Amino acid sequence: MSLDVSRWGEMGADDQSPSILHAEYHHKDHLGNVRVAFADRNGDGHIEILDSGNGGDSEVNQVLDYYPFGLQHPGLNCQPAAEPTNAYRYNGIEHVEELGLDMAFYRSYDPAIGRWMQIDPKPTYSQSAYSGMGNNPILYSDMLGDTINDPNGIVAGYRTQISSQITGLNTLLANSNLDFSSLGTTREAVAQLRGELQGVIGELDAMESSSQIYNVGFNSEMNANEGGVSFDNSDNSVRIEVGRGSDVGVISQELLHGYQFETGQVSISYDNSSYGTLYDITDETATYKREHLVVQGVAGLQSRESINDAYTLRLGASATPPAYQTLPRRNINISSPEGMKMMAREHMRQRTGPVRPLPTEVFKGWQ
């Protein structure tokens, strides 16, 4: 008897090929839903799709098709009885057959009704606390049961890159005999870089634990050098998007904009028709400084010193169409006079009339 090891570390008995250990692979769609599970049981480097009729068995262990909210299509799924069942299916969440529920990290989900069985720990203003995937399961996923984010792994990949840089810097700093001048830098500069990169990880942690939903993904209409932050008033999420193929520099800029929203440095118009009151030139300058830091490392500590608001305006003027030219030339945030006035205006709107009006602008805590 052999053991079948899935990517989630589960092990099950396989009666077809005793004493042979093989791995099971999962093919997923863009939302993390497992669609096909297969294993190269005979070790020939190929996957047999259909039974050959000559003693060769199909190596496809599982085929899964779903309705949009996760209920499996009757008659379209394949699960050979001889194989152990992969339980991690819709959204990559464990499905418990006995209960008919998907058991996420924070709560359980019923795919038959497309609703969670417990309230959302990060509720959304315009939706039921039990709604799943922001009522848009074609676009969004919710693998933890608490929020909607990162279906393309952008944040996870960025976190890995930054963490890898920190690990390398820790190695350098742990070597008390290292001559940093031979690397063209100083111990103090390396320590400063490590501290600032640790701050980047802290920003990601703050966004991931926030009551605000941040949805990070690719935008097919953007090229690899483009990105943007907008408000999705269908589910009250802040959408952070980059073009497919964007490098770590572009990603760092847009994720910093997300953190600026989290900390009251920027606001967004409700219908994305104009700039938010809190969005100013210093917010853009900060993102270009961040790009230099994460792309160039220690050298970025020096090169970013040449980046100021004038640099950002010149860069924007050369764009097609021109960018940043109408932004306020000073730092405006939620605590500034402009920010306090904007916040009071939006709160007053929510108190007037028998019907609660839509906001004109959103900021962290606007609800």
Image: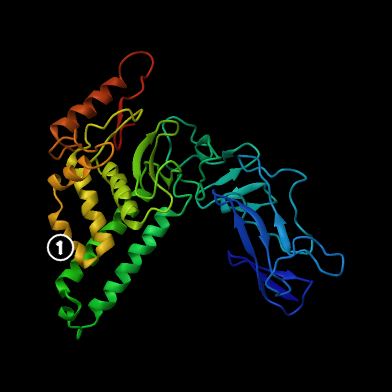
Q: Is residue 256 left or right of residue 177?
A: right
Q: Position of residue 170 (x, y in %)?
A: 27, 74
Give the answer, above or below, for where 115 lies relative to 11: above
Give the answer, above or below, for where 126 lies relative to 241: above
How has the structure been colored for display?
rainbow
* The C terminus sits in image quarter: top left
Q: Position of residue 1 (x, y in %)?
A: 76, 76
Asked if residue 365 can be seen in this view, the reply is yes
Three-letter amino acid code of the residue under disc 1: Gln
Residue at numbered disc 1: 302
Quarter holding residue 345: top left
Of 87 and 38, nearer the camera is: 38
Give the answer, above or below, for where 49 lies relative to 347: below
Asked if residue 198 can be seen in this view, the reply is no
Q: Is residue 312 left or right of residue 101?
A: left
Q: Is residue 327 left or right of residue 357?
A: left
Quarter holding residue 214: top left
Of 183 and 114, nearer the camera is: 183
Mark 1 crowdedness (10 Å alpha carbons): few <14, some 14-19, many ≥20: some
Residue at 37% over, 58% down: 158
Q: Position of residue 88 (x, y in %)?
A: 61, 56
Quarter holding residue 71: top right
In the picture as drawn, the residue positioned furthest to the bottom comes out as 177
Label 1 SS: helix
Q: Position of residue 266 (x, y in %)?
A: 25, 39
